[in-house]
Amino acid sequence: MLELRPTCENCNQALPPDSLEARICSYECTFCAPCVEAVLQNVCPNCGGGFVPRPIRPSKNRKGDNYLGKDPASTKVRHRPVDPAAHARFAAALKDIPPQER
Ligand SMILES: [Zn+2]
Ligand SMILES: [Zn+2]
């Protein structure tokens, strides 16, 4: 199950479970959309993979107790700001490699 981490790892902006700005990589590294676009260039600084919008977990119990009330978002902040220059080099080294081959 997704942890639904509470903030952007880079800028620490709050990303509540209903945020439309949250982006995750396949390892759930979590960033805000502005950081993914402007700083990360859609390259995860931790694994080199790309990002997708994080799905919103329902806030109401529509079916089978599958909702935030039973499975709340994580409160564990992971604030690990990237070094923009180092990340730019990392992203540049990957940019010509298709995601399937990274
Ligand atoms: Zn951010
Ligand atoms: Zn990652």
Image (tube, rainbow, N blue to C red):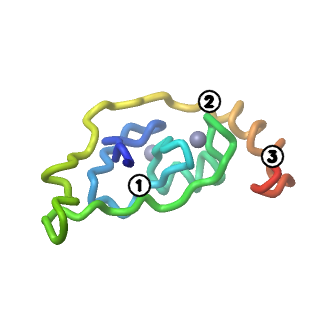
Residue at 57 percent across and 55 percent down: it is 51
Label 2–label 3 contact, CB within 8 A: no
Q: Residue 73 occupies which quadrant of the picture?
A: top left
Side of 84 where 27 appears, left or right = left
Count residues near mark 3 (Cα–Cα under 10 Å), then give few for <14, some for 14-19, many for 20+.
some
Q: Which residue is mark 2?
A: 83
Q: Residue at x 45, y 37 (%)?
A: 9
Mark 1 or mark 2, which is nearer the start of the sequence? 1
User: Does residue 23 lie above or below 3 as drawn?
Assistant: below
Q: Is residue 59 left or right of residue 95?
A: left
Element carrying mark 3: helix
Q: Is mark 2 within 8 Å of ligand 1?
A: no
- Residue behind mark 3: 94
Q: Residues within 10 Å of mark 1 (few under 14, many from 20)?
A: many
Which residue is depicted at the point 32% across and 62% down? 56
Amino acid type, label 3: Leu
Residue pushed farthest right?
96
Q: Observer-nearest residue: 23 or 100?
A: 100
* 10 Å crowding of disc 2: few (<14), some (14-19), many (20+): few
Q: Within the image, what quadrant is residue 84 found in?
A: top right
Q: Which residue is mark 1?
A: 22
